[in-house]
Image (spheres, rainbow, N blue to C red):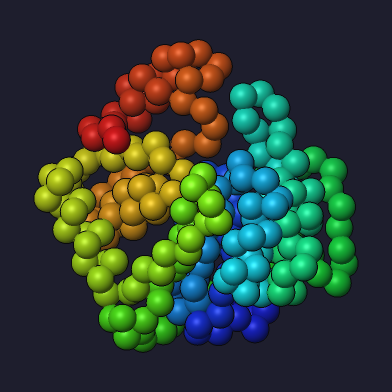
């Protein structure tokens, strides 16, 4: 992100399925003080556009595609349509499905090429406790989506302690929150709360009832999940 000129306070859109890169992208934004906006990958290009326009995001992180119930979803085509009439200057694309996609040589950048040969560490940008952390939008089912701004200090404290008190997180727990990071539940209890509490979090791409209805139970058994949310 820094190599593309992203700085503290810039707005970044994230339009990814539940893959490791969604976590890396969110934490990278947090590390340098950029304000991230995660958009649920199943949302349409119009829903994406509304959120990008509202935030004024300059970079969008997405993927070529992803699997859902045995089908490949062409996420890049949705992203290309969603950035029209927005301030997006660059699209960072994670190579996930390997499907054929449209490519703009001046605008599009492969994620794997961007992170290649980069240092493993990046100095954290100091942020005010009331400084902006991320913006997450309501679903829009009751009208125009409303952007909810979460701040650094308050969100981190709330996230740490609700995980510790409500879920009684312990060092040896394996925690599985099935919510997508495109929702506040997934933001908080799939990513930030487990990491702040120093426990293992499990991420699952796809539908937990496909290809069999007991898929979720098999995942719990295989990975020894101790808390299922």
Residue 142 on image: x %, y %:
49, 47
Q: Is residue 94 visible?
A: no
Quarter containing the C terminus: top left
Quarter containing the N terminus: bottom right
- The residue depicted at 53 percent of the width and 51 percent of the height is 143
Query: Up-down: is 95 above or below 69?
Result: below
Query: Up-down: is 56 above or below 225?
Result: below
- The residue depicted at 54 percent of the width and 32 percent of the height is 206
Query: Closer to the camera, 109 or 54?
Result: 54
Q: Quadrant of residue 10?
A: bottom right
Residue 56 on image: x %, y %:
62, 74
Residue 213 on image: x %, y %:
46, 14
Side (left or right) of 211 relative to 106: left
- The residue depicted at 65 percent of the width and 83 percent of the height is 5
Q: Is residue 127 visible?
A: yes
- The residue depicted at 87 percent of the width and 67 percent of the height is 105
Query: Up-down: is 215 above or below 191?
Result: above
Query: Closer to the camera, 94 or 209?
Result: 209
Extreme residue in the front direction: 143
Side (left or right) of 71 relative to 106: left
Query: Up-down: is 143 above or below 8?
Result: above
Q: Quadrant of residue 115?
A: bottom right
Please count the marks in the image: 0
Residue 104 on image: x %, y %:
87, 63
């Amino acid at each position: 992100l820094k190599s593309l000129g992203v700085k503290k306070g810039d707005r970044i859109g994230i339009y990814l399925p539940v893959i490791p890169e969604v976590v890396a992208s969110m934490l990278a934004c947090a590390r340098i003080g950029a304000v991230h906006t995660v958009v649920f990958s199943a949302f349409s290009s119009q829903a994406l556009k509304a959120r990008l326009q509202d935030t004024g995001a300059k970079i969008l992180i997405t993927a070529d595609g992803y699997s859902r119930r045995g089908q490949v979803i062409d996420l890049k085509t949705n992203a290309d349509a969603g950035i029209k009439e927005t301030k997006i200057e660059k699209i960072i694309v994670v190579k996930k499905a390997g499907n054929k996609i449209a490519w703009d040589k001046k605008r599009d950048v492969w994620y794997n090429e961007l992170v290649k040969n980069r240092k493993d560490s990046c100095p954290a940008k100091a942020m005010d406790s009331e400084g902006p952390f991320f913006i997450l939008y309501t679903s829009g089912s009751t009208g125009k989506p409303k952007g909810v701004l979460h701040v650094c200090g308050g969100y981190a404290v709330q996230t740490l302690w609700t995980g510790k008190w409500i879920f009684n997180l312990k060092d040896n727990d394996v925690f599985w929150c099935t919510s997508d990071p495109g929702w506040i539940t997934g933001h908080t209890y799939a990513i930030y709360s487990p990491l702040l509490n120093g426990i293992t979090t499990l991420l699952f791409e796809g539908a937990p009832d496909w290809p069999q209805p007991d898929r979720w139970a098999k995942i719990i058994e295989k990975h020894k999940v101790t808390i299922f949310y």
